[in-house]
């Protein structure tokens, strides 16, 4: 009985200490975050932020510039104008700024020249991701959109720009494969871990199923890793412009690609 009392008291003291450390750290953070909206300008990005530390915004800006040329070269991105990156400190502000309703997302692109991030830390998320990687993921969405829009523009003669935007949006929403849209971003951002891959591959999801499954975030990286290792990354831009047409770009069926991918994952993530 004495031992039990001692252990419960010890557990209580440890728990209270953890809570105290957490609260002190939170107060310390709140004192140091930027209260006003600030902008960090670099060559290719304007990072606009508030409610986070200046150092955190600087790290996002540095990571984006660091990955800029590599990703645009990988995907043969044509001219790309300066990108605005809005960083919000919580879900409310993120949802208000993006117009998303009840969203739990921590990032979203808004066309080829704008994306938003909800900055996650141990104070507002259970397992906060590496925000630099989330930023690179969203930037890759901007690159995909830019490439698709420029490609579509190059193929029409005289466009009424209002109609162009509307028609592009309709075609994109209907025909662009969602699995590829997300997988490519996870690949370029290096978002992968073995345990999640194994979990996501249970039941061997097809690419079609991954269009509407959150498992795409667990396994997406491996799809593009397989694509690149087998067919070369120089095929990625054509595959994108074909809206994911395997026959046209790789001369194989979707089924054939899938079985190659399953084998690849079995070997790489046994
Ligand atoms: Zn995404």
Image (spheres, helix red, strand yellow):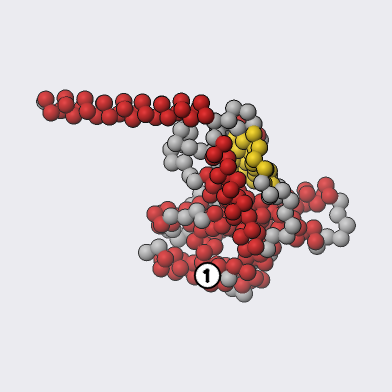
Residue 133 in the image: above or below residue 78: above
Q: Quick one: 77 or 174, which is closer to the camera? A: 77
Please say whether residue 77 is visible from this viewpoint. yes
Position of 19 with respect to 63 (left or right) is left
Q: Dot 1, how many residues are within 10 Å of its Cα: few (below 14), some (14-19), or many (20+)? A: few
Location of mark 1 (residue): 229
User: Where does residue 75 sit, x and y in percent of width and height?
Assistant: 65, 62
Could you say whether the residue bearing mark 1 is in a helix, strand or loop?
Answer: helix
Residue 148 placement (x, y as % from top left): 71, 57
Q: Is residue 98 visible?
A: no
What residue lies at 16% left-to-right and 26% top-to-bottom?
Answer: 6
Q: Residue at x 54, y 39 (%)?
A: 55
* Residue 196 left/right relative to 239: left
Q: Residue furthest bottom?
A: 251
The vertical placement of 252 against 1, above or below, is below
- The quarter of the displayed image where residue 198 is located: bottom left
- The image quarter containing residue 91 is top right
Q: Is residue 150 left or right of residue 72?
A: right
**Quadrant of image for the C terminus:** bottom left
Q: Residue at x 45, y 68 (%)?
A: 264
Residue 193 image point, x, y percent: 43, 55
Q: Residue at x 54, y 47 (%)?
A: 132
Q: How many marks?
A: 1
Rendered view: 100 above or below 248: above
């Amino acid at each position: 009985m004495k031992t039990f009392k001692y252990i419960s008291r010890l557990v209580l003291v440890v728990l209270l200490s953890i809570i105290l450390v957490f609260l002190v750290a939170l107060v310390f953070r709140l004192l140091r975050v930027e209260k006003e909206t600030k902008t960090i300008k670099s060559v290719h990005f304007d990072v606009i932020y508030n409610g986070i530390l200046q150092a955190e915004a600087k790290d996002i800006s540095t990571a984006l510039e660091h990955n800029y040329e590599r990703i645009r070269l990988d995907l043969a991105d044509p001219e790309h104008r300066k990108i605005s990156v809005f960083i919000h400190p919580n879900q409310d502000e993120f949802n208000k700024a993006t117009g998303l309703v009840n969203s739990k997302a921590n990032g979203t692109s808004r066309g080829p020249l704008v994306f938003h991030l909800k900055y996650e830390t141990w104070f507002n998320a259970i397992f906060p991701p590496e925000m630099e990687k989330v930023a690179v993921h969203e930037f890759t969405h901007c690159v995909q959109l830019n490439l698709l829009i420029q490609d579509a523009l190059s193929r029409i003669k005289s466009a009424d720009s209002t109609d162009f935007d509307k028609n592009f949006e309709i075609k994109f929403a209907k025909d662009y494969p969602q699995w590829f849209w997300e997988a490519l971003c996870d690949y370029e951002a290096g978002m992968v871990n073995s345990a999640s891959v194994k979990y996501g591959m249970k039941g061997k999801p097809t690419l079609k199923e991954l269009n509407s499954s959150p498992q795409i975030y667990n396994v997406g990286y491996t799809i593009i890793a397989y694509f690149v290792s087998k067919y070369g990354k120089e095929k990625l831009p054509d595959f994108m412009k074909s809206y994911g047409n395997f026959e046209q770009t790789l001369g194989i069926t979707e089924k054939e690609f899938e079985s190659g991918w399953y084998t690849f994952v079995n070997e790489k993530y046994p």
